[in-house]
Amino acid sequence: LRRIGIAFDTTEAVKDAQKVTSIRDVTVEPVEIITVRTSFIESAMELREFLDKAGEHAEPEIGSPIGVWLLRLRQRCRDNKLSAQEQEILATLNIDATYIPESWIAMLNMYANLRARRSSYLGVDIDRIRAWQREQFELVKKNDGSLSEAQIKR
């Protein structure tokens, strides 16, 4: 950081400023540096691109890199472990990180895959998916708080 002109304390900043100017009375004001991991920003932007293409309430496959990242993000959100900068990035990108259980997302993905194919495909218990669909419909009708707002939107 020093190579690009960032000083770590006021004394260092004053000495550096005096080296490059003939003015001897130098005032230095602290600058707040905001640091967020680049990987967080890249993943958030990748998720935003996915949502823009697939739909605002679409869910990436759980096993995909962005699906794993979103699951971990939601767990951190649930546990109040997101930094203010991370929360600001999510708000700027209009990303809802409300916690949704992995098992619920897995069933939603199976249901979406089944609907997309309009037929059965190997390895999926269609009756189980239909039962889950009916259960979700009943929970929405009950409106007893069993489903979060984020789940209902999906």
Image: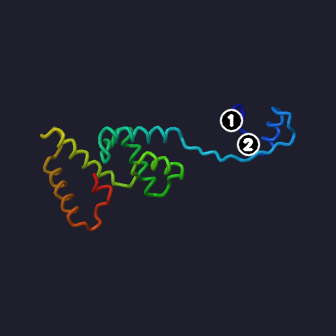
Image: 122 above or below 127: above
> Residue 97 or 27: which is nearer the viewer?
27
Disc nearer the start of the sequence (1/2): 1
Q: Position of residue 7 (x, y in %)?
A: 74, 40
The crowding category of the residue bearing disc 2, from other C-alpha atoms within 10 Å (few below 14, some 14 to 19, many at least 20), is few
> Residue 62 or 115: which is nearer the viewer?
115
Identify the residue under disc 2.
Answer: 8
Q: Residue at x 43, y 49 (%)?
A: 73
Mark 1 to mark 2: distance in Å? 9 Å
Q: Residue at x 38, y 43 (%)?
A: 68
Mark 1 secondary-structure assignment: loop
Amino acid type of disc 2? Answer: Phe
The crowding category of the residue bearing disc 1, from other C-alpha atoms within 10 Å (few below 14, some 14 to 19, many at least 20), is few
> Residue 68 or 143: which is nearer the viewer?
143
Q: Position of residue 58 (x, y in %)?
A: 30, 45
Identify the residue under disc 1.
Answer: 1
- What is the count of numbered marks? 2
